[in-house]
Amino acid sequence: MDELQGEPAVRGFLHKAEAPNADSLVLTHGAGSNCNSPLLIGLAEAFCDAGVTVLCCDLPFRQQRPHGPPLGSAENDQAGLRRAVQVLRNQIGGRVFLGGHSYGGRMATMLAAKDPSIADGLLLLSYPLHPPRKPEQLRTAHFPSLRTRALFVHGARDPFGSTEEMESASRLIAAETKLVTIDGSGHELLSARNRDAVLKMVTKEFKAFFSQ
Protein backbone atom coordinates (compact mmCIF):
# COMPACT_ATOMS: atom_id res chain seq x y z
CA MET A 1 0.00 0.00 0.00
CA ASP A 2 2.76 2.43 0.91
CA GLU A 3 6.53 2.24 1.01
CA LEU A 4 9.28 4.79 1.57
CA GLN A 5 12.99 4.08 1.44
CA GLY A 6 14.36 3.28 4.89
CA GLU A 7 10.91 2.87 6.46
CA PRO A 8 8.74 -0.23 6.94
CA ALA A 9 6.31 -0.93 4.15
CA VAL A 10 2.59 -0.76 4.89
CA ARG A 11 0.81 -3.72 3.32
CA GLY A 12 -2.89 -4.17 3.75
CA PHE A 13 -6.32 -2.87 2.85
CA LEU A 14 -7.84 0.55 3.46
CA HIS A 15 -11.56 0.35 4.20
CA LYS A 16 -12.92 3.85 3.66
CA ALA A 17 -16.11 4.82 5.43
CA GLU A 18 -18.85 6.04 3.11
CA ALA A 19 -19.82 8.76 5.57
CA PRO A 20 -16.53 9.43 7.37
CA ASN A 21 -16.46 11.27 10.68
CA ALA A 22 -12.69 11.98 10.50
CA ASP A 23 -11.81 9.11 12.85
CA SER A 24 -9.63 6.27 11.59
CA LEU A 25 -8.25 3.03 13.01
CA VAL A 26 -5.15 0.96 12.29
CA LEU A 27 -6.04 -2.65 12.96
CA THR A 28 -3.64 -5.56 12.87
CA HIS A 29 -3.55 -9.29 13.50
CA GLY A 30 -2.30 -11.91 15.93
CA ALA A 31 0.84 -14.05 15.78
CA GLY A 32 -0.71 -16.78 13.65
CA SER A 33 -2.82 -14.71 11.31
CA ASN A 34 -2.74 -11.84 8.82
CA CYS A 35 -4.77 -8.78 7.80
CA ASN A 36 -7.35 -10.99 6.08
CA SER A 37 -8.50 -12.63 9.30
CA PRO A 38 -12.31 -12.90 9.70
CA LEU A 39 -12.15 -10.80 12.87
CA LEU A 40 -10.30 -7.91 11.25
CA ILE A 41 -12.38 -7.93 8.07
CA GLY A 42 -15.62 -8.11 10.04
CA LEU A 43 -14.59 -5.24 12.31
CA ALA A 44 -13.42 -3.14 9.36
CA GLU A 45 -16.83 -3.48 7.74
CA ALA A 46 -18.64 -2.70 11.00
CA PHE A 47 -16.50 0.35 11.72
CA CYS A 48 -16.94 1.65 8.17
CA ASP A 49 -20.70 1.49 8.65
CA ALA A 50 -20.20 3.58 11.79
CA GLY A 51 -18.17 6.23 9.95
CA VAL A 52 -14.67 5.10 10.97
CA THR A 53 -12.10 4.42 8.23
CA VAL A 54 -9.99 1.31 8.92
CA LEU A 55 -6.56 0.26 7.71
CA CYS A 56 -6.10 -3.50 8.16
CA CYS A 57 -2.41 -4.20 7.74
CA ASP A 58 0.13 -7.00 7.97
CA LEU A 59 2.86 -6.57 10.55
CA PRO A 60 6.43 -6.67 9.19
CA PHE A 61 7.03 -10.24 10.41
CA ARG A 62 4.08 -11.43 8.33
CA GLN A 63 5.30 -9.52 5.31
CA GLN A 64 8.55 -11.46 5.55
CA ARG A 65 6.98 -14.89 6.09
CA PRO A 66 3.47 -15.99 5.04
CA HIS A 67 3.25 -18.47 7.91
CA GLY A 68 4.67 -18.94 11.39
CA PRO A 69 4.89 -16.81 14.53
CA PRO A 70 7.00 -13.67 15.03
CA LEU A 71 10.58 -14.43 16.02
CA GLY A 72 12.40 -11.55 17.69
CA SER A 73 10.64 -9.01 15.51
CA ALA A 74 8.92 -6.86 18.15
CA GLU A 75 10.90 -3.70 17.45
CA ASN A 76 10.40 -3.95 13.70
CA ASP A 77 6.71 -4.78 14.12
CA GLN A 78 6.22 -1.69 16.26
CA ALA A 79 8.00 0.39 13.62
CA GLY A 80 5.53 -1.00 11.10
CA LEU A 81 2.62 0.12 13.26
CA ARG A 82 4.13 3.58 13.59
CA ARG A 83 4.40 3.81 9.81
CA ALA A 84 0.78 2.67 9.37
CA VAL A 85 -0.41 5.40 11.73
CA GLN A 86 1.61 7.94 9.77
CA VAL A 87 -0.02 6.83 6.53
CA LEU A 88 -3.50 7.25 7.99
CA ARG A 89 -2.70 10.67 9.43
CA ASN A 90 -1.48 11.78 6.01
CA GLN A 91 -4.49 10.41 4.15
CA ILE A 92 -7.41 10.89 6.54
CA GLY A 93 -6.58 13.44 9.20
CA GLY A 94 -8.53 13.64 12.43
CA ARG A 95 -8.15 11.23 15.30
CA VAL A 96 -6.21 8.01 14.69
CA PHE A 97 -6.70 4.94 16.86
CA LEU A 98 -4.46 1.90 17.06
CA GLY A 99 -5.72 -1.60 17.63
CA GLY A 100 -4.93 -5.22 17.20
CA HIS A 101 -5.81 -8.79 18.01
CA SER A 102 -3.59 -10.64 20.48
CA TYR A 103 0.06 -10.07 19.45
CA GLY A 104 -0.98 -7.10 17.32
CA GLY A 105 -2.59 -5.48 20.35
CA ARG A 106 0.45 -6.18 22.47
CA MET A 107 2.67 -4.43 19.91
CA ALA A 108 0.26 -1.48 19.97
CA THR A 109 0.53 -1.14 23.75
CA MET A 110 4.32 -1.40 23.70
CA LEU A 111 4.54 1.30 21.04
CA ALA A 112 2.11 3.58 22.90
CA ALA A 113 4.03 3.08 26.15
CA LYS A 114 7.13 4.46 24.43
CA ASP A 115 5.29 7.21 22.56
CA PRO A 116 1.93 8.33 24.04
CA SER A 117 1.36 10.65 21.07
CA ILE A 118 1.24 7.77 18.57
CA ALA A 119 -2.53 7.28 18.85
CA ASP A 120 -5.64 8.85 20.34
CA GLY A 121 -6.71 5.54 21.85
CA LEU A 122 -6.14 1.78 21.81
CA LEU A 123 -8.50 -1.06 20.88
CA LEU A 124 -7.09 -4.28 22.34
CA LEU A 125 -8.76 -7.48 21.22
CA SER A 126 -7.88 -10.59 23.23
CA TYR A 127 -4.77 -9.08 24.79
CA PRO A 128 -2.37 -12.03 25.38
CA LEU A 129 -1.81 -11.38 29.07
CA HIS A 130 0.23 -14.55 29.55
CA PRO A 131 0.83 -17.82 27.67
CA PRO A 132 -1.89 -20.44 28.27
CA ARG A 133 -1.41 -22.25 31.60
CA LYS A 134 1.50 -19.96 32.53
CA PRO A 135 -0.10 -17.14 34.54
CA GLU A 136 3.22 -16.25 36.13
CA GLN A 137 4.60 -15.05 32.77
CA LEU A 138 2.72 -11.76 32.63
CA ARG A 139 3.22 -9.43 29.68
CA THR A 140 2.52 -6.24 31.61
CA ALA A 141 5.96 -4.76 32.37
CA HIS A 142 5.18 -1.77 30.15
CA PHE A 143 1.63 -1.17 31.42
CA PRO A 144 2.64 1.43 34.08
CA SER A 145 4.16 3.53 31.28
CA LEU A 146 0.94 3.57 29.25
CA ARG A 147 -0.72 7.00 29.10
CA THR A 148 -3.17 6.20 26.30
CA ARG A 149 -6.83 5.35 26.89
CA ALA A 150 -7.50 1.72 26.14
CA LEU A 151 -10.57 -0.38 25.42
CA PHE A 152 -10.02 -4.09 26.07
CA VAL A 153 -12.31 -6.68 24.48
CA HIS A 154 -11.81 -10.15 25.93
CA GLY A 155 -13.43 -13.54 25.68
CA ALA A 156 -14.59 -14.98 29.00
CA ARG A 157 -13.00 -18.31 28.06
CA ASP A 158 -9.71 -16.94 26.76
CA PRO A 159 -6.80 -19.12 27.97
CA PHE A 160 -4.40 -16.18 27.60
CA GLY A 161 -6.00 -14.45 30.60
CA SER A 162 -9.15 -14.63 32.69
CA THR A 163 -11.53 -11.73 33.20
CA GLU A 164 -10.23 -11.30 36.74
CA GLU A 165 -6.63 -11.28 35.55
CA MET A 166 -7.43 -8.73 32.87
CA GLU A 167 -9.19 -6.47 35.36
CA SER A 168 -6.18 -6.62 37.68
CA ALA A 169 -3.72 -5.94 34.86
CA SER A 170 -5.68 -2.97 33.52
CA ARG A 171 -5.34 -1.24 36.89
CA LEU A 172 -1.60 -0.94 36.21
CA ILE A 173 -2.37 1.55 33.42
CA ALA A 174 -2.48 5.20 34.43
CA ALA A 175 -4.89 6.18 31.66
CA GLU A 176 -8.61 5.37 31.62
CA THR A 177 -9.42 1.80 30.57
CA LYS A 178 -12.50 -0.32 30.06
CA LEU A 179 -12.83 -4.09 29.82
CA VAL A 180 -15.64 -5.53 27.69
CA THR A 181 -16.13 -9.26 28.27
CA ILE A 182 -17.75 -11.51 25.68
CA ASP A 183 -19.45 -14.45 27.34
CA GLY A 184 -18.72 -17.84 25.82
CA SER A 185 -15.91 -16.59 23.59
CA GLY A 186 -12.32 -17.76 23.53
CA HIS A 187 -9.22 -16.11 22.13
CA GLU A 188 -10.60 -15.71 18.60
CA LEU A 189 -13.69 -13.85 19.90
CA LEU A 190 -15.89 -14.64 16.88
CA SER A 191 -17.94 -17.73 16.15
CA ALA A 192 -20.64 -18.48 13.60
CA ARG A 193 -23.27 -17.97 16.29
CA ASN A 194 -22.06 -14.70 17.80
CA ARG A 195 -20.38 -12.95 14.86
CA ASP A 196 -22.92 -10.21 14.18
CA ALA A 197 -23.58 -9.54 17.86
CA VAL A 198 -19.89 -9.27 18.73
CA LEU A 199 -19.07 -6.95 15.83
CA LYS A 200 -21.98 -4.71 16.75
CA MET A 201 -20.98 -4.73 20.43
CA VAL A 202 -17.34 -3.85 19.77
CA THR A 203 -18.27 -0.97 17.47
CA LYS A 204 -20.83 0.38 19.92
CA GLU A 205 -18.47 0.15 22.89
CA PHE A 206 -15.66 1.82 20.92
CA LYS A 207 -17.86 4.72 19.85
CA ALA A 208 -19.17 5.24 23.36
CA PHE A 209 -15.80 4.98 25.11
CA PHE A 210 -13.95 7.31 22.77
CA SER A 211 -16.75 9.85 22.37
CA GLN A 212 -15.86 11.39 25.72
Image (tube, helix red, strand yellow):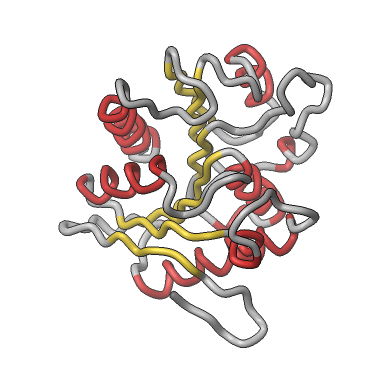
Q: Quadrant of residue 6?
A: bottom right
Residue 75: image quadrant is bottom right
The image quadrant where one finds the C terminus is top left
Q: Check the picture and name the quadrant holding the N terminus.
A: bottom left
Q: Is residue 65 left or right of residue 194?
A: right
Outermost bottom residue: 5
* Residue at the left extreme of this rendering: 19
Q: Which residue shows up at 54% across the image and 27% down it?
A: 187
Placement of 155 over or under 20, stated as above or below: above
Q: Nearer the viewer, residue 81 or 134?
A: 134
Residue at 46% of width from left, 19% of height from top? 185
With 145 as the anchor, is 99 left or right in this view? left
Residue name at image x 59 percent, y 47 percent? 104
**Image side of residue 200 versus residue 135, left or right:** left
Please state which of residues 65 and 5 is positioned toward the viewer in this rendering. 65
x%, y% of residue 201? 31, 27
